[in-house]
């Protein structure tokens, strides 16, 4: 008994130290800027440690730190720069470490490139949105797994010369454990510099990098705030999260935080953002949530403001591939988990109250509750802190050498669909299995050990993919290594003037003749987009639960039988 107590105490000490290292701010505080790490002379060398700790509510927090104590730094590199990132795993396994998907978990002393270990204490990194190769030490997430006993594991790659300038992010991607680590706070921003070279409108502006994360509720048992117009009945989904009640109010599935300042249910005390009166800024927001969809709006004296969208998912808006200083003025911006928005905001005048909110997202009858809630107040102040500033005399970005994705004929059209099934057919409201399936195949939960691709494509081609949602909850389709063009949304032509790497696919209502779908043009033209990588729902609970598939993109020189010739 005594020995057990001592071990528990030692574990607690480690956990408390890590909590100290990760120093999370209190609710209602000023929103700090994540620390910047900038490349010099063409390279950025970073040492990152990942830690975990037990929060006061019993949930497990995670964070990345640098040797000098910076937490979750923003990595800033130019196109062509080399990133050398040494990742040390300082995780302690919280609770049961085994995971049902794997039998190779004891391979702790092996080569992290071949490990494939999937335990609560395993980790790795995915560089979300970057067009870099899916190989070990770059952006490979299926086999790469770093254990607590391993020496620092080196990620080493160049930002492609033609990577669009914008906001990307990094987070762990261990199958079965992505949700717990990301929900705990393991994420950070990565910026490919030069957005002002694509959009002159933002030249000379100060920027704010805002990482919105979700976390387990701090006050799960509290009743909703009395200020809410309706108090809906509390419904729980199979994971114990608050289920969507369709009112826009009530208990959320998760709390949100902004640059780690929590905004907890039920009163949502907003974090504080100061800005010089009426200053124009570029706000760069990543939704680093594990399961929460955002629908961002900025109110001044309760009136929605126009937000000048300049980039989505890291890619500046353009006109059919031509850089045309594109700004799209929007009153609100939907951001799925994993998505990014970058927009121009004009600060409030003195005395005007500003508020950053997320409006309710209808995730469907099977989805989680993502209600209306405040995130931060925006206050005009002459003494507002001054953060990083974009160049005011940028050299314009040269035009892309490749044809606009929308103008390239696809070599084929594939159909895929999201679906769910109760593990026990007798318990339709019990635990669910999650699938993404190529039409005609049998739905099976993703097996990381199978190694068999669900789709084989060829580098140099583009394909159209129609993704259906046959389930009663919203999903967010994401694919590694490339961006796609949203051609159709719910059967309607949109042909957006920008690219995405994550997109919502609305839920099925059980009545319509057709399932809701999106049509995407997938871009396999980049030479880096070769090898085996994954596509999945970016709701990490679904991804961890099997809603993931494998694609192998073969080099263009290799013979592949049933591919028609690429038409230009
Ligand atoms: Cu999903």
Image (spheres, rainbow, N blue to C red):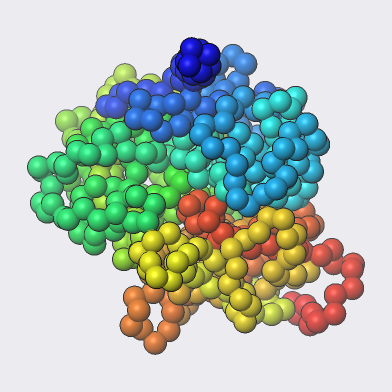
Question: Is residue 526 depicted above or below 46 in this figure?
Answer: below
Residue 312: give x, y in percent of width and height.
Answer: 50, 53
For this view, does 502 lie left or right of residue 361?
right
Q: Residue farthest to the front?
A: 1
Q: Residue farthest to the bottom?
A: 513
Q: How many marks?
A: 0
- Decide if residue 480 is in sight here: yes
Residue 216: give x, y in percent of width and height.
Answer: 37, 39
Query: Depth check: 472 or 528 in front?
Result: 472
Residue 123: give x, y in percent of width and height.
Answer: 63, 37
For this view, does 560 lie left or right of residue 252?
right
Question: Is residue 200 depicted above or below 112 in this figure?
Answer: below
- Image quarter where the C terminus lies is bottom right
Residue 441: give x, y in percent of width and height.
Answer: 63, 77
The quadrant in which residue 58 appears is: top left
Query: Depth check: 165 or 361 in front?
Result: 361
The quadrant in which residue 385 appears is: top left
Query: Depth check: 367 or 45 in front?
Result: 367
Which residue is found at the position 47% from the left and 64% from the top?
Answer: 423
- Decide if residue 44 is in sight here: no
For this view, does 153 lie left or right of residue 516?
right
Which residue is found at the position 75% from the left and 80% from the top?
Answer: 567
Question: Is residue 423 depicted above or below 288 in this figure?
Answer: below
Question: Is residue 389 depicted above or below 550 in this figure?
Answer: above
The quadrant in which residue 524 appears is: bottom right
Which residue is found at the position 16% from the left and 42% from the top?
Answer: 223
Which residue is found at the position 57% from the left and 31% from the top?
Answer: 93
For this view, does 160 lie left or right of residue 371?
right
């Amino acid at each position: 008994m005594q020995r057990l107590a001592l071990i528990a105490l030692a574990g607690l000490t480690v956990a408390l130290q890590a909590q100290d290292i990760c120093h999370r701010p209190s609710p209602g505080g000023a929103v700090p800027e994540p620390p910047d790490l900038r490349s010099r002379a063409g390279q950025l060398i970073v040492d990152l440690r990942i830690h975990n700790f037990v929060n006061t509510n019993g949930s497990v927090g995670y964070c990345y730190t640098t040797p000098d104590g910076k937490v979750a730094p923003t990595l800033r590199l130019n196109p062509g720069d080399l990133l050398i990132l040494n990742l040390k795993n300082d995780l302690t396994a919280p609770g049961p470490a085994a995971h049902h998907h794997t039998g190779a978990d004891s391979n702790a002393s092996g080569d992290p490139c071949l490990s494939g270990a999937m335990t609560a204490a395993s980790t790795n990194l995915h560089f979300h949105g970057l067009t870099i190769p899916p190989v070990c030490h770059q952006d490979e997430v299926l086999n790469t797994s770093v254990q607590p006993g391993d020496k620092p594991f080196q990620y080493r790659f160049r930002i492609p010369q033609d990577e669009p300038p914008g906001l990307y992010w990094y987070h762990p991607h261990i199958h079965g454990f992505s949700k717990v680590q990301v929900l705990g706070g393991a994420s950070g921003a990565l910026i490919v510099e030069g957005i002002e070279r694509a959009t002159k409108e933002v030249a000379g502006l100060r920027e704010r990098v805002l990482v919105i994360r979700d976390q387990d509720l701090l006050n799960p048992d509290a009743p909703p705030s009395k200020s809410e117009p309706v108090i809906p009945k509390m419904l729980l989904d199979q994971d114990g999260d608050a289920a969507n009640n369709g009112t826009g109010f009530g208990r959320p599935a998760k709390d949100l935080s902004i640059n780690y300042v929590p905004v907890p249910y039920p009163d949502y005390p907003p974090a504080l953002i100061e800005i010089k009166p009426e200053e124009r800024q570029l706000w760069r927001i990543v939704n680093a949530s594990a399961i929460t969809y955002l629908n961002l709006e900025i109110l001044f004296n309760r009136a929605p403001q126009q937000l000048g969208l300049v980039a989505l998912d890291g890619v500046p808006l353009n006109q059919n591939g031509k850089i045309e200083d594109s700004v799209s003025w929007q009153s609100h911006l939907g951001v799925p988990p994993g998505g990014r928005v970058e927009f121009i905001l004009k600060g409030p005048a003195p005395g005007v109250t500003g508020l950053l909110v997320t409006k309710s997202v209808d995730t469907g009858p099977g989805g989680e509750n993502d209600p209306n809630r405040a995130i931060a107040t925006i206050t005009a102040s002459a003494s507002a802190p001054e953060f990083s500033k974009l160049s005011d005399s940028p050299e314009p970005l040269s035009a892309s050498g490749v044809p606009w994705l929308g103008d390239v004929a696809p070599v084929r059209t594939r159909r895929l669909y999201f679906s769910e099934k109760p593990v026990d057919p007798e318990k339709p409201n019990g635990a669910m299995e999650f699938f993404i399936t190529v039409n005609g195949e049998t739905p099976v939960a993703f097996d990381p050990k199978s190694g068999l691709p669900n789709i084989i494509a060829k580098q140099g081609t583009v394909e159209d993919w129609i993704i259906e949602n046959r389930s009663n909850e919203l999903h967010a389709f994401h694919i590694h290594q490339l961006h796609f063009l949203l051609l159709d949304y719910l059967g309607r032509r949109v042909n957006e003037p920008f690219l995405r790497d994550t997109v919502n696919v609305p839920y099925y209502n059980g009545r319509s003749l057709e399932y809701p779908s999106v049509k995407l043009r997938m871009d396999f033209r980049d030479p880096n987009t070769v090898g085996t990588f994954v596509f999945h729902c970016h709701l990490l609970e679904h991804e961890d639960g099997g809603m993931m598939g494998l694609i192998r993109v073969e080099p263009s020189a290799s013979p592949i039988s049933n591919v028609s010739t690429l038409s230009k």
